[in-house]
Amino acid sequence: ESSICSDGMDLTNGLPSLYSIKVVLAALGPEPGKCKNYLNEIRKNKVLEGSGLHFTPAQDSPFRNWTTLRSRVHLDFCAPTSISRSDWDEFHVHRKPFAVVGVVHCPSTPDLKAVHENFSTLKQHPAFANVKRFQCYAFEPKTSKEEHTFDNMIQFPNQDIEHTRFYIKTILSDLISQLLADFEQIVIRSLKSRKFVVLTPADNRKSHGDIVENKKICLARRNKHVGDFCLLAGSSADARRYYKEALDPARQTSDWIWGGGIMEGLAACSMLEHGPQKAADSVIEHMKQALNYYKTLPGLSHLLRISAGFKLGRLYVHLAQSDETYKRKARDILRQMLDIATNASAQDRILISLEAASIVSSLNYPRTAAAYVHRASGIYLALQQPLHGLQLLSIAAPSFQMKLTIPEIKEEGKSGRDFKEESLTDGWVWRSDPTFQAKYRESAVTDTHWNGLHVKVIGALVSATAKKENVEILDYNQLRLRAVCLGFLLESSYPKLSTKYQKRLANRLTAVNNAMLPNQIPVNGILQVVQMRPQPLAPEEVPLKSQKEGKEEVFVYVPTSTQAATEKASVVEYVAGHPIDIILRLRNPLSIPVLVESVEILASKPFQTF
């Protein structure tokens, strides 16, 4: 599914999306989960051969090179939530949905008529205003004749899985054949219209009249528009012809945004005809030219440039499977796009950083990915959304050799939903490891940079988990969350923190604890128990019936060690009711003082301490 971002920017789709028809799949009925298997079977039909389609181009059709033997149509199945209307829809024809397919599981749907009525209301949904075809697929139907009267509802007979797959492919082929006929009519009308022109948000409103009157601009945009539909129809030869006819008028009129779109279309043609491996050089050349065209104009063109850069980056990722040199190229182009994104909105910068992190992570660059996630978390913190920032830091934690355990906390007024369920990942405990495997040392993030970034992450967690000025207005659950976070940070990350940072953490933890009175939560594990040894009794206190001395391990708690240290000690017995002495040695690993108000020994049986 596509990320929700500004118009004109698409981060999640690569070049194949330019020649794929978008089809929306919607699960219907009271139990949509019952449709999962059928939805998966429909999604398997991503490519339909021309030999299975019932389409013949007309004499005046722009699809003159479309043939049943050579042409193939690609489909992009998506969820309804990923669709939204955009002012760039006519520039990016491939982003528009052209068909909506509803899927219903009849045995779990008692009222099929009501479901069909709900499906019919999708036609009025604003996001589906451009949709040409609506169909509803009913699986495992009953035998009622009344159910056969619903418009646009196709019932699949109860058959084995192989027959069901055959019926699905046949029905989809009929649907796509109808769409190809619709595409043909759209482009024929465009070619016959003398005043056809497509406007975008990048066009100055004051110049709309000049654009309409400029024949070369109209010619370039019309041919690019026709080429887009030829590409969706699977006729790359026709698409290439129209793109080339559009390129010169676009250059002559300095219509650089449309020139960039034309170059992207030519890159998609090469990929569709020869595949990404054989056409790599041609595709990369076209995409670099598109980036140069988008670079020419300021303003909204930076969103198109970022989208094109991510398409090129995804191509590099694919090529890197057979050639390691493309890994560096993918990382470098994404870094350039992040630099361009400084002018984008905060939400767009978050999405760009996270998508870039996802891509470089697939290239086994965990340091670079962690740096991008940290960048996104910093934007959330700047927006005063610390819990979202903390969630992103949790994603980056494994790369920093850290993890943080947050207790389950219920947020007030949310009827039992876990606080962590909404804002945090499942429980994790921060542990800092100053070493990092050499295989993860990438040239993009040097060791010096990495150590500095490591400390910045801890500083970000300080900001995310405690803000002194807001302590008084926080409820108990929020205070508890922040106290626990700060405690674990003090316990595990002190080797990375300066004295200033340690004092800052301690002061904020004190403020949080004071605000929580009388329900203070002690932060365990900061002070390390070095030794706890019961002292032997004096000779006159030894009971008459004493057992032989034995040897056993005495537990010594050291939080930062991988294994608990142990010492040998003699087992002693004490006389009930007699006082005894226990020596307890503690160590403060911090460079700041830690006040100990009380020490208590807990035992499985009643035990009185003095």
Image (spheres, rainbow, N blue to C red):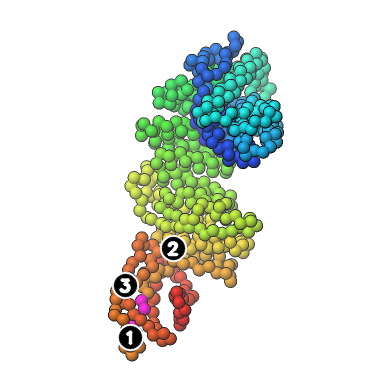
At 61% from the left edge and 41% from the top edge, which residue is drawn? 31
Query: Which mark is in front, 1 or 2?
Result: 1
* Residue 200 in the image, given as x and y percentages of width and height: 63, 28
Q: Earlier in the sequence, mark 3 or mark 2?
A: 2
Q: Is residue 419 magenta?
A: no
Q: Which residue is mark 2?
A: 491
Query: Which mark is in front, 3 or 2?
Result: 3
Q: Is residue 268 above or below residue 424?
A: above
Q: Secondary structure at mark 3?
A: strand
Q: Quadrant of residue 364?
A: top left
- Range shown magenta: 533-538
* Residue 385 in the image, given as x and y percentages of width and height: 58, 52
* Residue 562 in the image, given as x and y percentages of width and height: 36, 60
Query: Which mark is in front, 1 or 3?
Result: 1
Q: CA distance from mark 1 to mark 3?
A: 21 Å
For the residue marked with disc 2, what is the amino acid? Glu
Q: Residue furthest top?
A: 59
Q: Which residue is mark 1?
A: 545
At 55% from the left edge and 34% from the top edge, which residue is drawn? 39
Q: Which residue is mark 3?
A: 552
For the residue marked with disc 1, what is the amino acid? Lys
Q: CA distance from mark 1 to mark 2?
A: 45 Å
Q: Secondary structure at mark 1?
A: loop
What crowding class fits label 2: few (fewer than 14 Cα within 10 Å), some (14-19), or many (20 or more)? many
Q: Nearer the viewer, residue 537 or 400?
A: 537
Q: Quadrant of residue 38?
A: top right
For the residue marked with disc 3, what is the amino acid? Glu
Residue 604 placement, left or right of 85? left
